[in-house]
Amino acid sequence: MTDILTLAASNLLSPIILSFALGLFAALARSELSVPEAAAKALSLYLLFAIGFKGGASVAAHGIDGRLMAAVGAGLVLSFGLPFIAFALLRVMTNLGRIDAAAVAAHYGSVSIVTFVAATSVLESRAIAAEGYMVAVAAAMEAPAILSALWLVARGNRAASPEPGLWREILLNGSIVLLTGAFVIGMITGEKGLAEISSFIVAPFKGVLCLFLLDMGLVAGRGLRDARGSAGGGIGLGAVLFGLVMPLIGSMAGLALGLAVGLSAGGVALMMVLAASASYIAVPAAMRVALPEANPSIYLTLSLGVTFPFNLILGIPIYVAVAQALTGG
Amino acid sequence: MTDILTLAASNLLSPIILSFALGLFAALARSELSVPEAAAKALSLYLLFAIGFKGGASVAAHGIDGRLMAAVGAGLVLSFGLPFIAFALLRVMTNLGRIDAAAVAAHYGSVSIVTFVAATSVLESRAIAAEGYMVAVAAAMEAPAILSALWLVARGNRAASPEPGLWREILLNGSIVLLTGAFVIGMITGEKGLAEISSFIVAPFKGVLCLFLLDMGLVAGRGLRDARGSAGGGIGLGAVLFGLVMPLIGSMAGLALGLAVGLSAGGVALMMVLAASASYIAVPAAMRVALPEANPSIYLTLSLGVTFPFNLILGIPIYVAVAQALTGG
Amino acid sequence: MTDILTLAASNLLSPIILSFALGLFAALARSELSVPEAAAKALSLYLLFAIGFKGGASVAAHGIDGRLMAAVGAGLVLSFGLPFIAFALLRVMTNLGRIDAAAVAAHYGSVSIVTFVAATSVLESRAIAAEGYMVAVAAAMEAPAILSALWLVARGNRAASPEPGLWREILLNGSIVLLTGAFVIGMITGEKGLAEISSFIVAPFKGVLCLFLLDMGLVAGRGLRDARGSAGGGIGLGAVLFGLVMPLIGSMAGLALGLAVGLSAGGVALMMVLAASASYIAVPAAMRVALPEANPSIYLTLSLGVTFPFNLILGIPIYVAVAQALTGG
Amino acid sequence: MQTHTAKRVEIVIEAPLERRLTEVLTKAGVTGFTVLPVLGGSGRSGRWSREGQVGRAGGMVIVICLIRPDRLDSLLEAAFAVVERHIGVVSVTDCEVLRAERF
Amino acid sequence: MQTHTAKRVEIVIEAPLERRLTEVLTKAGVTGFTVLPVLGGSGRSGRWSREGQVGRAGGMVIVICLIRPDRLDSLLEAAFAVVERHIGVVSVTDCEVLRAERF
Amino acid sequence: MQTHTAKRVEIVIEAPLERRLTEVLTKAGVTGFTVLPVLGGSGRSGRWSREGQVGRAGGMVIVICLIRPDRLDSLLEAAFAVVERHIGVVSVTDCEVLRAERF
Ligand SMILES: Nc1ncnc2c1ncn2[C@@H]1O[C@H](COP(=O)(O)O)[C@@H](O)[C@H]1O
Ligand SMILES: Nc1ncnc2c1ncn2[C@@H]1O[C@H](COP(=O)(O)O)[C@@H](O)[C@H]1O
Ligand SMILES: Nc1ncnc2c1ncn2[C@@H]1O[C@H](COP(=O)(O)O)[C@@H](O)[C@H]1O
Ligand code: NA
Ligand code: NA
Ligand code: NA
């Protein structure tokens, strides 16, 4: 326990978290500080490319572990399954309707890549190794949750006509393609490829992450500010509670499957992070197309304004400590 | 004297100055070379974050000097006071009206962060140490000058009704918040934090500064080009002269206060630079809101087209040489 | 021969080429992956600045070779001359009209800087030295081809009234000014200047190139996709064949002149690359102004969709191998 | 100068729907359209801004369509089928165009 | 298709004034607006361009507002109070909108 | 509020021609214009998008011009001289402006 607290404290005082806090503060104080949309997108492309490439190169270096397929399978199970737990919880803890609850549930089955990236950087700074293919698991977990959410809605509703082109769009969304593509490139070019471009994708990585989290803080803070003042009085207390409890539940499921697959301490921690995190890029866009009746401010506020900071600040140190304790790593 | 000339010559032939000159040339030659707005903003966010963080980390390393508060106080005095000198000079040297003169004066009381950044990089390349908290002084000097300018206008005019929300906007403007925030982060995370992200904020710093100055050259050149051809025949000779004399006067005030506070050679040089430089981002935006009747092309041309290049090319080497001579550093 | 194949294979599996392939794949699969326009422009500014500066610094280090002027002269001859060959070929191999053929021809006389950059990075990774001033040759080759194309059109047509301002616009286009400017800055500041900013322009260079090629792949793929489906049924087979044959012919001309000038193995290879490559930024913009009747989708598809990937994947290794064989380098 | 009556239809629509809308417009016989970026806005669903955003959700674009008056109805019906369930605003203005043969 | 008359107000205004203008519009009972980026322009105060700019001063944005005709006057008065002392241009066009209940 | 009739001319034109168009407009006595960015579009020459593009070719901008009605013809003639051989669309809408002395 003290261990977790020490970890959390040291985590709290890292440049990464403090940059996020700065963004949050600036937005809540209504500062006009802002990152241009194009710059934010460029930073996210960089992070996806770098994390994918490094994962692939690490797989190339350590050989394809027999557990890769099992880990991807576990990820798929989590992504398909967690929305059902989330949906049930939401229906109990909040007064969200079926559609809003299903839309929120989709976000929690899917993953937040930047939470994953922040976790890998915490692992690195503590010299805890993790399987490189966890990047592939992350990519695999992005989409299935959307299917579960649509099924949850269709069940209670008329048979929702599957929107043509939606599936291609979801499976080929930018972050899945770039993450998987960079992973494959890293696997093909291996350590040699990594050496060639490591002064671009390894050395400045953490600094870029700081700037990106500054931006995430700004966007999350703006969202919280506007939600607070919005017509519906913002999201309710039950929903906020859900946003804090659900990552813990998700992480337990991730823990169980991570241990079952036999991952290392780092791998288990990352599996917990993936299960605990909620999408805020790919799933919201898919929801606007597939479930336009769902209120975007609910799922965006929960995912970006509640669960993301929770995971970043408290969640990651907890998951890492638990994973280390239970794997003996 | 020869010393200053050698310094100026070596300064003149640094990649930083030459990049600025290239931008200036390209704009005056009407090349369509341009930096996208989003990229320019991203570069400036990077510079603010990096310079703030490094300042904070340096304070963490060397301990909070008893002189920090004194230095910040000196900065406030300069920022409040210089507009009065500038205003008086402008009324004598030019035929600008009260409002235009006050608006220009506000710019010279405030600071240009990029001039400050260029000066720190000159100090670094000459291995002259400076107090890390000079970054905090820079942040403190951004806003007060605006107050003085508004007072100058109000005195001669009806009581200018204070525009609601203007003060919050000025005090929380993007560069103050980011600079101060990064400074605090640097102070909290210290040398360890700096080590984590130094391949992002230290190693490539000077190169990024080159690209940013290329852009500044383009913008300044475009401004000069359009001012030359503009209806009013551009700004007068008196105003140009003011743009060259005022930084020298400001730097003398900065010198006096810097010596009084007991700063190191580098610190005194930076105090001179801050006093000598003129804002071109925060103050113009505040002036458009607070003094819309003031002609923006006058203050932008003076600040960005005259004083900025003067400080960059001649001013900085002069201030550094004088500071070294008078502190024995 | 086996040598070329080995080179081609190792080239094929470099992060650079694979990043391009990833972009191509994503666009053809209709993924919504995209790089913001401002970010793509910023990457290209970085590449131009870095390659120009490094070239200049290398000239400063190795002294101005008597062959510099001869090499620039050879470049001018190629840029003026190749459009005539390309035009004749196009009239034979395709059924393009005079105007379309002339517009395409202009692209092949001019150069693609990113192909040049990719080639320098291949040379570097094989430790083959090249003359730094090849950057100046590249800059010199951008514009003359446009003159030849306009002459080809004017000959068959009414005397094309020279569009006022067009020449200034072409000669001062962004990439010529930035490349030449950075070259001059590199030459002036030399090794010392390079050392100051090498962690910005040297270390991360290859990684930035990967991201830029990812974007080029996306843009090329989108072009191919749309050309395929377009009204005219896309470009014909003859045109595609031209896009593959012309670079080989160009490279032979570049080889002859490179050898005649007495360049090193690396210099000859780069001269071949310049001659073989086709412009896709500066010339298309000039053509829209000067020859608006020419169909842009033809020249863009050929230059970016056919010749660029051909050079990147097969051309460069071939040119390098041939240059090495024939110079004994 | 010779001009011809036409209609200018301006559709503010959520960015993730852009492709669907333009596909539907093309099917409805529209010969061209232009897509503009939007920085931010406000409506019944609250205030929003694109600053710092990475995802497409939560952003809007404007699609402008110049058409012959007799095609207006089929365009509006096609557009409405997409806009109906979504956030979005449609307005129509009378205008004059040069080169009517293009529309 | 059923459409309803409305007014389309387009205000070109200095970027630093954007927040003030939209606040005033909201107070004047406007139910929505859309903000567009502007690359550059020219007017009595000369030519300008956003390229390479970092600060907001020296840039403009466009605020578009669709409203019911009877609200036009109060909107224009509110807008004019902000635009009056500043650089800016206001134009009003007649238009038709779908879903009139939104405005 | 006191408004004055004017014309709003909207010209969609290839980005490399922007400077030429605005120069010609200025010569034709236009007192001001505003240039907007365009993300993409579609027309007789196919679909295009600015995403990831570096060069100006293959992109469009919109130039908006508010003018007094009596100046419309000379503006259209000037604009048409540039647009004629190029890709581009011109539309004109009736509008009302505040501060007519500006136009
Ligand atoms: N009256 C209006 N005038 C202009 N734009 C509007 C208006 N109402 C809504 N919009 C735009 O359409 C978006 C969605 O509107 P809404 O569905 O009302 O939230 C807003 O964020 C605005 O960008
Ligand atoms: N007649 C006009 N048509 C379109 N936009 C205009 C017009 N006049 C001014 N503008 C825009 O409003 C800005 C400020 O105008 P001004 O106050 O005349 O300098 C200009 O830079 C243009 O962007
Ligand atoms: N009917 C239209 N409505 C709106 N924009 C159009 C229309 N037709 C063409 N455009 C725009 O003008 C560009 C060039 O048109 P075109 O010359 O027909 O290829 C297109 O890519 C669109 O951006
Ligand atoms: Na999850
Ligand atoms: Na100052
Ligand atoms: Na060539």
Image (cartoon, coloured by chain):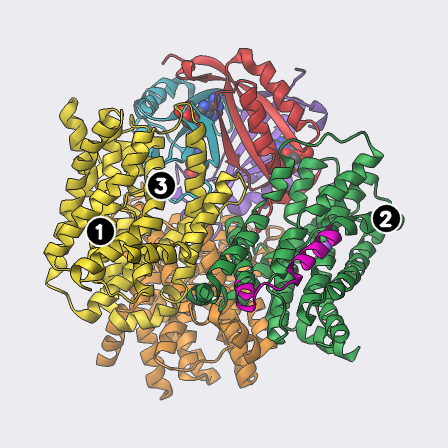
Chain colours: A orange, B yellow, C green, D purple, E cyan, F red
* Residue C248: x %, y % from top left: 79, 62
Mark closer to the chain start, 3 or 1? 1
Image vertical order of residue A242 relative to residue A29, above or below: below
Inspect the image, locate mark 1, and give the three-letter code of the amino acid beneath it.
Met
Q: What element carries label 3?
A: helix
Q: Residue C159 vs residue F88: left or right? A: right
Report the front residue among E37 and F82.
Answer: F82
Q: Residue B272 carries which label?
A: 1
Residue C73: in magenta span: yes
Q: Which mark is residue C88?
A: 2
Q: What element carries label 1?
A: helix
Q: Is residue F28 visible?
A: yes
Looking at the rendered structure, whether the residues under marks 3 and 1 are on a common chain is answered as yes
- Local packing at callout 1 (Cα closer than 10 Å; few below 14, some 14-19, many 20+) is many
* Residue A45: x %, y % from top left: 50, 60
Would you say the magenta stretch is mainly helix, strand or loop?
helix
Q: Residue C183 vs residue C241: left or right? A: left
Inspect the image, locate mark 2, and give the three-letter code of the amino acid beneath it.
Ala
Q: Mark 3 lies on which chain?
A: B
